[in-house]
Image (spheres, rainbow, N blue to C red):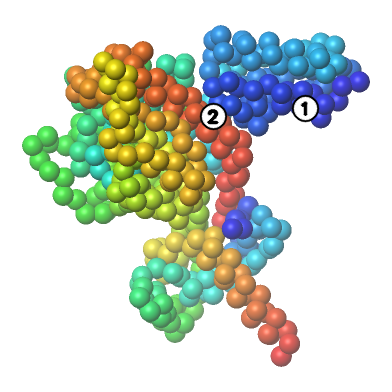
Amino acid sequence: MLNQEQALDALRLVVEPGLQRDIVALGFVQELKVSDGRVAFELQTVRPGEAAEKLKREAEDKLKAAGAEAVAIELTGRARGNPVGDGQGSLPGVRNIIPIASGKGGVGKSTVSANLAVALRQTGARVGLLDADIYGPSIPTIMGARQGPQLQGQQIIPPVLHGVAMCSTGFFLNPDQAVMWRGPMLSKMVDELFRRVIWGELDYLIVDLPPGTGDVQITMCQRIALTGAVIVTTPQPVAVQVAEKAVIMFQQLKTPLLGVVENMAYFESAKTGEREYIFGSGGADALAGHWDIPVLGRIPLATNLRESSDAGAPIVVSNPDSPAAKGFADAAAQLIAAVSVRNLNAEKPVEINF
Amino acid sequence: MPRPLKISRHGSHDIAMEWDTGRETVYPARFLRLACPCAQCQDEMTGKRLITDSALPILTYPTKIEPVGRYAVQVHWSDNHSTGIFTWEYLWELADELDKRREKAALS
């Protein structure tokens, strides 16, 4: 008779094609019950639709081949949440808070944040996007926000753009004024934005951080229960070196790192299809290899990517078949997997009774 | 790096920590207050302690303990001091020091 271990062994043969890992390692198998040769479990996939159905069929086949008499699989498609206690910096209803950071400015962090958020939304997840880059809030432009949030007393209701709830520090700053704030002001701004925006139920809240390793980043890591950070870099050694400082900062603040996105990875000629490595190559690999964090994706340089950012329609919406959009979709899928694995292995938060 | 699973009150003022390694440590309130790592209590460059035992009220105890990210707690004290952030790493070091002191006391 099939036992629990044998059922798990059979399920380990089922590999998520996009993520190249088996469904047990990814934590997709939940509530597994095996008795009298009957197997039942919840399959928590991260990509609903045909891909999920295919995984389900494959799991059935493998279990039957291993000797299961009956198999009942329930498909569920919600992101697993970051396990944190109440009052430990969690936001009600928000399952995962993911800051997007870079060491160096100008590597396309905001473009990556916006497109990742919309690409996550396109998988069926509920997504929010917070622009915490107080020095140069550019998310409203990239997402095409024509109006700011609605205010209801102390609460901020974010506009929804391309299916993503979005709030920006830019909404609350005078556009013709430069931000010259000291630490305490910055910390307060971050706190207020997190607490006062009504996000509703979210699987992922993507946070576009300012470049560098300053007050905003430190306050976030100290006050907010983050699932883990994503680092954006270009292949250029000068960008990688500065990105490394961001990696070290997150490690010191014990914030997990979910992966690296390499932006401006190469330029592909539309005419000949030839690839040119304008900023060199291997930057993200070097960073990932040295710090043992995965490369989530590589985004090529493209004229239409720049144009779509300026026009307020992220390229995953305006030109979904372009190589850049596909790069973002792949990166989003890898990010979902990284979050799933991370939350599965996450340590329980400390219990304080004092 | 070891991390605590539970932080609770021990007796009336002391702090008990249960670590994920199984270790249990009781930090006397005054000991922990004197070990405060913030810049007012310790010189940032030299590490020299700036807070002295005689400067503290006789009865000094924690009023509130709050988590800081995934790596530390912030302790609010009865002498209105709350800027110290005690990381797991630092608390582990202090646990070692307490064990050493207690061993010495037991030998003498």
Q: Which residue is mark 1?
A: A9
Q: Residue furthest left?
A: A176
Q: Position of residue A234 (x, y in %)?
A: 32, 39
Q: Residue at x 71, y 58 (%)?
A: B22
Look at the picture and state if B7 lies above or below A48.
below
- Can the viewer see residue A128 in this picture? no
**Res A11 → quadrant:** top right
Q: In whole angstroms, how far apart are the C-alphas of marks 1 and 2?
A: 20 Å
Q: Which chain is disc 2 placed on?
A: A
**Which label was assigned to residue A337?**
2
Q: Residue at x 57, y 71 (%)?
A: B94
Q: Amino acid at mark 2?
A: Ala
Q: Position of residue A209 (x, y in %)?
A: 31, 40
Q: SS at mark 2? A: helix
- Can the viewer see residue B85 in this picture? yes
Mark 1 and mark 2 lie on one chain; the one further toward the N terminus is: 1
Total tally of numbered discs in the picture: 2
Q: Position of residue A25 (x, y in %)?
A: 65, 32
**Res B89 → quadrant:** bottom right
Q: Which chain is disc 1 placed on?
A: A
Q: Amino acid at mark 1?
A: Asp
